[in-house]
Image: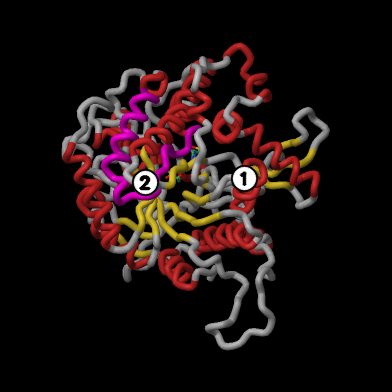
Amino acid sequence: MKDFTRRRFGQTVAAAAALAGSSIPGFAFGQTGAAGSEADHDSGRKFPDGFLWGCATAAYQIEGGAKEGGRGPSVWDVFSHTPGKTHNGDTGDVADDSYHLYKEDVRLLKNLGVQTYRMSISWPRIFPEGKGQPNPAGLDYYNRVVDELLANNIAPFVTLFHWDLPAALPGGWQSRSTSLAFSDYAAYIARQLSDRVKHFMTTNEIACFTDLAYRDGSFAPGLKLPLKDVYQIRHHGILAHGLGVQAIRANAKGPVQVGLAENAQVFVPVMETEEHIRAAQRATRVMNAPFLTALMEGKYIDEYLHSIGSDEPRVEAGDFAAIASPLDFVGDNVYICNYVSAAGTPTGFEIEPWPSSYPRMYSRWITISPECAYWAIRNVCDLWHPKAMFITENGTPSADVLTADGRVADLDRVMYLRNHIANVHRAAVEGYPIKGYFLWSLMDNFEWDDGYSTRCGIHYVDYKTLKRYPKLSAEWYRELIKRNEVV
Ligand code: GBH
């Protein structure tokens, strides 16, 4: 299992904080000169009016109720119940029990003052067999959640697929028919919920449910297939997204906004000069070729086709027309980046290796580079000019300790969030169409292969009692939302 002590968190936390602080962009934009009273004082940190603040979660990570209300098993149920696959053998059987406690979760959201909540729907709750007859009890649950959110003035942003693939679908994403089944599921949800839900995301992080699940084997269903198969699986992933977009548009009861939640690899120029900025842009296009680049450009670019050679996936007529369906917004989950330099190589860029001393959060994989939040937006907008963007996830684990008086002073999480949001602010004031931000996560939850060993929430969950406690980061986020500015 994953060994927490291997993680090199902490050793350079002070250095990390200093570094993160020094990379806060200037807040000179929009300043109006001498400050008057506190109320009309322009800190230069204000977000545009109407900027949407939210929290994000995913069904399998929070719901529990795995066998209730007619839900069928997902590949994550099977995987997590297979010995040796998740930390400590943890499963999502109970998780945060949001299946029963959703009203309490909406109260947490209300208390934060968020305008939006990004949640996902469990496909096997709706179609226990993946396709065929829908399960009315499954839909009822989401009707209740959506109604509760709306009653509290919180707009649901719904992700249709956050990795909990119905286990009954033969071959999973190896089979093209899974993309078609996804399209039917998307159509059904659009018909049922679009009277109240106005924002839909098709898929979450295509690389995770394809590469990590079928190439690396670390995510369900845990296979390690040859690359030729993986390329085909990736194609089924982007095809599902595209067919899903079409199905939502064709079946929605009124105007809806459709996008997805990707985790495009982010590239930050080693310094902000023309040549390195261009290199970061090129890297963004080439390194995301199988996923976001394919969606935005409606093709596999030459660099990708060249790299996969004769293992090219089967693409049917019309696939790319679906895959490139126009989107109302591009959502991006942003946690990390790589630094790039301009280079005299054929690609024109070079990805810099991480020095072993580079600071990290309390995580194997989160290196601290808050400017990734700015470049995630800028690179995508400069390359492809989407109508709108959202940061659909951003957050970090922390070694949270609940004190006897019920407090969690998660200073490192606040440091991480403040610096990332400051970089989102930079993109907003520079005029990039960034419309909102979703913090990962509302509360601690089932962190996939890491089970419950990793806490990413701004509410602490006591997994024995299922009680939720706001951490310092929740208080901080609430204040930020109230003022619509970095605090
Ligand atoms: C997001 O993925 C997910 O959308 C969300 O469900 C999740 O809870 C959140 O991150 C926090 O982790 O084992 O060291 O090789 C982010 C992409 C892909 C990052 C898998 C961690 C494993 C790193 N994740 N990756 S490692």
**Residue positioned 66% across, 32% down in the render:** 286
Q: Is residue 235 magenta?
A: no
Q: Amino acid at mark 1?
A: His
Label annotation for residue 158? 2
Residue 176, image x and y in percent? 41, 19
Residue 187, image x and y in percent? 32, 34
Query: In terms of depth relative to the viewer, which is nearer, 404 or 278?
Result: 278
**Residue positioned 28% across, 50% down in the render:** 96
Residue 259, image x and y in percent? 46, 42
Query: In terms of depth relative to the viewer, which is nearer, 6 or 195?
Result: 195
Residue 331 shows up from this direction:
no
SS under mark 2:
strand
Q: Is residue 300 left or right of residue 128?
A: right
Mark 1, Cα crowd under 10 Å, few <14 / some 14-19 / many 20+, is some
Residue 415 shows up from this direction:
yes
Residue range (magenta): 178-207
Q: How is the image coloured?
A: secondary structure
Q: Is residue 292 left or right of residue 192?
A: right
Q: Earlier in the sequence, mark 1 or mark 2?
A: 2
Above or below: residue 12 compared with residue 313: below
- Which quadrant holds residue 344? top right
**Which of the image's four quarters has the N terminus?**
top left
Mark 2, Cα crowd under 10 Å, few <14 / some 14-19 / many 20+, is many
Q: Amino acid at mark 2?
A: Val
Above or below: residue 126 compared with residue 217: below
Tell me the residue that label 1 is attached to.
385
Residue furthest out toward the top: 310
